[in-house]
Image (cartoon, rainbow, N blue to C red):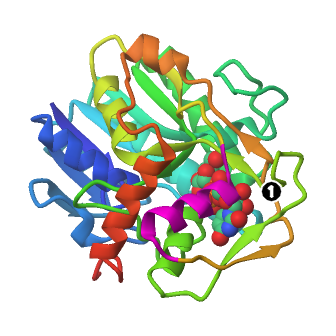
Amino acid sequence: MNVFVTGGAGYIGSVCVEELLNAGNTVTVFDNLSEGHRSAVDPRAKFILGDLADRELVARAVVDAQVEAVIHFAAHALVGESMQNPGKYFRNNVAHGLNLLDAAVAARVRKFVFSSTCATYGVPETMPMDESLPQRPVNPYGESKLMFETMLRWYHQIHGLEFVAFRYFNAAGASRKFGEHHRIETHLIPNVLKVALGQRPQCEIFGTDYPTPDGTCIRDYIHIVDLAQAHILALAPGKAGFFNLGNGSGYSVREVIQTCAQLSGQPITAVEQPRRPGDPPRLVAAAGKALSELGWQPKFPSLEDIVATAWDWHKRHPAGYRD
Ligand code: UFG
């Protein structure tokens, strides 16, 4: 298929583009490089430097590339930042995303795949979390993604746009070529691995008094290549709807740090800090719907495999991407 990937220079997008190309698709990447990296774009893809704010450019690009499917990764994705600057999240993730949605309808795109998040659920009342839970986001980031989900429902009903929206849990790990390099790194695994690389003296544990067995937050880590594979399955005709993507196993912050220490063979000093605002204690997916309806089968469900691929990539790219 001809696939148009926004945010294809970012962490999740770069690996998905690689997998799409490996599966024989033709890919156009559209990215403003505000968070992404030019060298994270697979050289087999066509690259357009552009911003979703530019309505005409987006519309033209979708027509020119004879797009059959859109995969929309481009977004701001930091919970903490969204609590400081909500306008940035609603403008980019909602208003600018709408330009892409309109372009897809105008060009009669067959499938729209959207990166949503488990942050749309807020603080869940039951665990593990399936797709039927009420969505009550507790920050503007989660709210902006939920608003886009709502727009997708209406665009489907009114314009017949077929869509898949994936609610990601915690994306982690790397492919052989592409890995995680955020300009400002806030994520747990890359920050812990920086200690193993000797780039930081210590990492931080945000909160040790949560109602969990070791007092630290529990998350469901999902390998980036498994995440990418789900997007390829979503392109098949007839696949539609909302799907959680996670492994169904939760690991605490302390367990992640311990795994990073074991796999890197390096001692890791961790300093206990107060809770980080907005962090739910435990987020674990029930992803049975993706398994049964999409035929999705994660290949790297263990935390060891996830951290091992991240460590391998960071060792080979200690400074991340060069641009
Ligand atoms: N944490 C630490 N120390 C750090 C970094 C993080 O203790 O240096 C803790 C956090 O407090 C949290 C856990 O590790 O409890 C995971 O934090 P991340 O920042 O790696 O990931 P989040 O769960 O906060 O957020 C990620 C994505 C969001 C997405 C969310 C869904 O960044 O975009 O997963 O769960 F919405």
- Residue at horizontal 64 percent and vertical 55 percent from the top: 255
Percent position of residue 73, x then y: 42, 48
Please say whether residue 52 is visible from this viewpoint.
no
State yes or no: Cβ of the residue under disc 1 lies below 8 Å from any atom of ligand 1: yes
Q: Which residue is mark 1?
A: 278
Quarter residue 203 falls in: bottom right
- In the image, which residues are magenta? 251-266
Is 19 on the left-hand or right-hand side of 129? left
Which percent across, then down, holds residue 219? Answer: 65, 46
- Image location of residue 74, percent across then percent down: 43, 54
Is 198 rendered above or below residue 285? below
Image coords of residue 129 (percent x, y) = 69, 27
Amino acid type, label 1: Gly
Residue 46 belongs to the span the image colors magenta? no
Specify whether 302 is left or right of 129.
left
Q: For this rendering, which residue is in front, 270 or 180? A: 270
Element type at marker 1?
A: loop
In the image, residue 27 above or below residue 110: below
Q: Is residue 131 visible?
A: yes
**Label 1 crowd (10 A; few <14 / some 14-19 / many >=20):** few
- The image quadrant where one finds ligand 1 is bottom right
* Residue visible at 76% across and 27% down in the picture: 127
Q: Considering depth in this image, is 118 or 307 the residue closer to the camera?
A: 307
Image quadrant in which the N terminus is located:
top left
Q: Main secondary structure of the magenta part?
A: helix
* 253 falls in the magenta region: yes
Task: Tell me where residue 238 sits by quadrant.
Answer: top left
